[in-house]
Image (tube, helix red, strand yellow):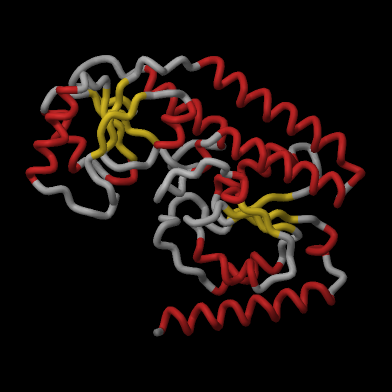
Amino acid sequence: MKIKLLLLIIVSMFASLVVLSSCQNSAISSEPKIVGTLPIVSSIAEQIVNNTPIKTVSVLKGTENPHTYDLKPQDAILFSRASLILSVGGIDSWASKIINSSNITSMSLLAFEKNPIKNNPHIWFDFNAVLNFSKNLTDYLSKKYPQYKSNFEENYASFSLKLKNIKKSYNLSSKRVAQIAPTFNYLFREFSINDTATLLSDPEAEATINQIIAFISELKKNNVSCVVNNELLGTKYSDIVSEKGFDIVELSPFVGPVFSENIISLYKNDLNNIKNCTSLGTKVR
């Protein structure tokens, strides 16, 4: 009840701030600002607005858990100063009421996911979705700020080329992996990595002894190269698997100060870790 009341207050506060901002001829209105719900969508935007005066900022800074985040009053202030709001969709549903109650233009990465994987919100590992999202962002910004159209288009072309080069650089179809929890399904699909088994269907759940035994049995049966762990989940289960002689690869799902610097380095770091996963009984970070 208290959370619902706080959310109602924050949404009402946001609506008032938007009206106030639109009535003021301030530095805020003269400095276009793209507000992303998560650092990952802000990082995509940064690729497009590079070398222009347009600023990008994220509500989350990369140290919070986006699955369990609750809106704060200062978030309403940040959203109210946006000229454009970017979201992932699903994983950041905590922002949906503010986005839906606003007359500020918004874009969702989820809207460009043509082949969604059930119960998996990490769609930024789908390169086609990211490219379509960034192309739509490029077209929108080119119309809104035509003086920077050539910058946006050049930046999009550069970003697109970076993704294509990453696709060419990693041939991982021979990798047979398993996951502690189903975090990286989009990445595996993107690079034709054979995902043979998953221990936890829900990252928040606790595995039983029988589940762990069955999982290790699947690893042996399928001749798994390595076991992938989301580094946010800790090492409780990966330590058990490592003791049985399997490679553990700690991958990052997010961009942020304790993760990768931007979306390109996120892809490369995770893919390099999978590529280097060859020695039994080791941990690759």
The front one of 79 and 161 is: 161
Rendered residue at 31%/19% (across/down) = 277
State the quadrant of the N terminus: bottom left
The front one of 119 and 94 is: 119
How many marks can you see?
Answer: 0
State the image quarter where residue 249 is shown: top left
Q: Is residue 198 above or below residue 243?
A: below
State the quadrant of the C terminus: top left
x and y percentages locating residue 168 in the rendered image: 56, 16
Can I make out residue 133 in this image? Answer: yes
Q: Is residue 100 above or below residue 147?
A: below
Can I make out residue 53 in this image? Answer: no
Rendered residue at 33%/42% (across/down) = 182
Rendered residue at 63%/66% (across/down) = 99
x and y percentages locating residue 80 in the rendered image: 69, 69
State the image quarter where residue 27 is shown: bottom right
x and y percentages locating residue 222 in the rendered image: 21, 22
The answer to whether residue 221 is left or right of residue 174 is left
The front one of 262 and 1 is: 1
